[in-house]
Amino acid sequence: MVEILLVEDDLDLASTVSDFFEIKGFCCDHAIHGQIALNLITSHQYQVIVLDINLPKINGFDLCRKLREQGVDTPILMLTSKSSLEDKLQGFECGADDYLVKPFAMQELLARINALSLRRSGQVKQRTFSGIKIDEQQRCTSIEGNHLKLSPTEFNILKLLVSHAPEPVSRTCIQDNIWSEELPETDCLKVHIYKIRKELGRFGRADVLKTIKGFGFALKANNED
């Protein structure tokens, strides 16, 4: 099933588009502003992101640029009322793959989504930091060809840390992305971090996973301490 993230602050339009996608057999998540979108993208694997430009908190141009800087290569379709050539060029310069101006025909949106998702299906999504390779398609982690033995939760935590590396990730951000509304027991995150660090240690990478006192955790190469 094609999974789509719709980032749109117009609730009526978002509802209409989401319903249309679901009728067509897609799974559609909705974010009303950029910060929610960032949180969802770090914990989910979408085939296409449909992105408005005039958003609260983080506008679409800045969000698109930020995602590309973080290594997110999911196809992005900008869906916006901004129709000038300058706006379109700015969208592509920020990293957008396609650009559709409002008002639009649903069938045209569908055709563009299908084209982007087919392009995406042929790609293998991987992230690497300090020799730690995350294969999101196979949902596995390896170091120099050696597979790490991680639970699904531990894989998601490590994937989140790799996607932000070398920047730190707060405990709150990890909890919100991994467990959503069902907060874990007090020591649950601590236990998972311990197990991840122990598994990294089997291949000489334990010291890459840093605890940031009073904040959270980060992956840092040895020369970045």
Image (spheres, rainbow, N blue to C red):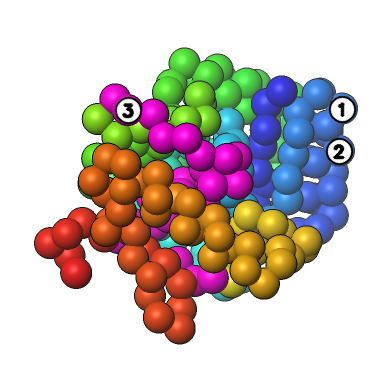
Q: Are marks 3 and 2 in contact (CB under 8 Å)?
A: no
Q: Are marks 1 and 2 in contact (CB under 8 Å)?
A: yes
Give me the C-alpha separation between circle 3 and circle 2. Answer: 43 Å
| Position of residue 188 in the picture relative to residue 87 (left or right) | right
The nearer-to-camera label among 1 and 3 is 3
Residue range of the region highlighted in magenta in the rendering: 145-171
Q: Which residue is mark 1?
A: 23
Q: Identity of the amino acid at label 3? A: Asn
Residue 190's spot in the image, x, y percent?
54, 65
Q: Which residue is mark 2?
A: 19
Q: Is residue 31 magenta?
A: no
Residue drawn at 51 percent across, 26 percent down = 137
Q: Is residue 169 magenta?
A: yes
Residue drawn at 76 percent across, 33 percent down = 27
Residue 21's spot in the image, x, y percent?
78, 32
In the rendered image, which quarter is residue 108 located in? top right
Residue drawn at 50 percent across, 24 percent down = 138
Q: Which structural element holds mark 3?
A: strand
Which residue is most to the bottom?
Answer: 214
Can the viewer see residue 178 in this picture?
yes
Q: Quadrant of the N terminus?
A: top right
